[in-house]
Image (spheres, helix red, strand yellow):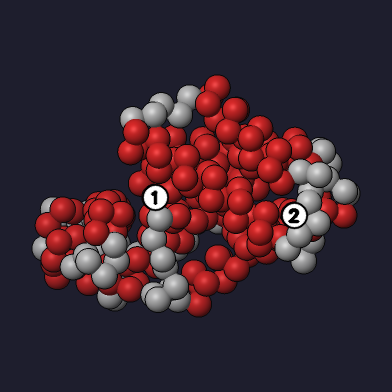
Amino acid sequence: MNIHSLVTTRSQLSSPSPRPARASGNGDKSEAILLAALSLFVERGFHGTAVPEVAERAGVGAGTIYRYFASKEALVNVVFRQHKQALLGRLLADFPLHASTREQFSALWRRTAQYVAEEPLGFSFLELHHHSSYLDAESLALEQRAIQFGVAFVETAQKRGDLRPVAPAILIGIVLGAFIGLVSKSTQCGLTLDASLWTVAEQCVWEAIRI
């Protein structure tokens, strides 16, 4: 699948995941549960988080969670899809298909940086945890589409003669490694990721992958 087809079918990536059914008369507690689960999964990981802990942080009874989610695995998959779709929707909306590779790279870099600023917990959950042990078929398909987009972007740019002619996974790893490392170090070192710093980092990473 090429980059054009992936972008033009972005609705399959960015459409919201179906919400859990709302329990009659109880209001919509699912959002509180999802927010509590997100924060705990970031703090303790999936395996280190127990359903009663999610319930306590959400301010609901443990049994209430099972009225919205069949299991902890079902809950974490909804959290995963919710945030993966939010990120992909941001990246692919009005993607500049006919711009230069440099301009496209800048759009992806800056849009991801904006997502980090607005959804720091969501980004941490997506990028700083291993998900493979519990992702269901729907979540795996979403992850695969994201991977396909990254590979298609690199291969298209390589055909233009803009990026180094190595395996796409290598270039993607360089970019993501630098991006995630910068976010991590900013937290550890109290570094403020303002627009000027993101711009400098973007140029450094671009120089590492371009021809």
Question: From where the camera sits, is residue 187 visible?
Answer: yes
Residue at the spot x=78%, y=51% of the render?
Answer: 164
Question: Which of the two residues, 145 or 188, is positioned nearer the viewer here?
Answer: 188
Q: Residue at x 47, y 45 (%)?
A: 181
Q: Position of residue 62 (x, y in %)?
A: 13, 67
Question: Alpha-carbon neighbours of circle 2 within 10 Å: few (<14), some, or many (≥20)?
Answer: many
**Of the residues shown, which amino acid type is indicated by label 1?**
Ser
Residue 151 falls in which quadrant of the image?
A: bottom right
**Relative depth, front residue between 60 and 72:** 72
Counting from the top left corner in percent of width and height, residue 106 is at: 67, 36
In this view, 76 is above or below 117? below
Q: Residue at x 76, y 37 (%)?
A: 102
Query: Front-most of 177 and 151?
Result: 177
Compared across the picture, whether 40 is left or right of 134 comes to left
Secondary structure type for disc 1: helix
Q: Which residue is mark 1?
A: 124
Which residue matches tag 2?
A: 154
